Image (cartoon, helix red, strand yellow):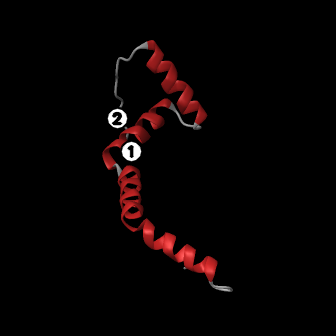
Amino acid sequence: MAKTQLGARVDDEIAELAKARAKDRGLSVGDYIASLVRDDTDGLRQRGLDAARRFLDEHQAVFDEAEDADRHTPGAHAA
């Protein structure tokens, strides 16, 4: 993949935070910033978490009922 160099001015504190976080993740600062942009534009993880939360909010009672039934039925296991 071709790479393009970008320049950005940020506060010293932000630059240090970016360098530290990139190092923690084993990435160059450029790769770290690219991952942040991908995460922001894709939003896949957040959409997945939001969908899972909505699902549980709507259907938690079904799982609770299955667990209760399992506790009261010897040898049974909830799916």
Which residue is depicted at the point 52% across and 77% down?
66
The residue at which mark 1 appears reads as 39
Judge the density around disc 2: few (<14), some (14-19), many (≥20) Cα neighbours within 10 Å. Answer: few
Residue 21 falls in which quadrant of the image?
top right
**Dot placed on the residue nearer the N-terminal end, 1 or 2:** 2
Do we see residue 27 in this rendering? yes
Q: Nearer the viewer, residue 44 or 8?
A: 44
Which residue sits furthest top? 12
Q: Secondary structure at mark 1?
A: helix
The residue at which mark 2 appears reads as 4
Q: Amino acid at mark 2?
A: Thr
Quarter of the image for the C terminus: give it.
bottom right
Q: Are marks 1 and 2 in contact (CB under 8 Å)?
A: no
Q: Which disc, if any, is residue 2?
A: none
Give the percent coordinates (x, y) of residue 51.
36, 59
Give the percent coordinates (x, y) of residue 72.
62, 80
Which residue is depicted at the point 34% across and 21% down?
8
- Mark 1 or 2: the one toward you: 1
Which residue sits furthest left? 41
Do we see residue 78 in this rendering? no
Q: Amino acid at mark 1?
A: Asp
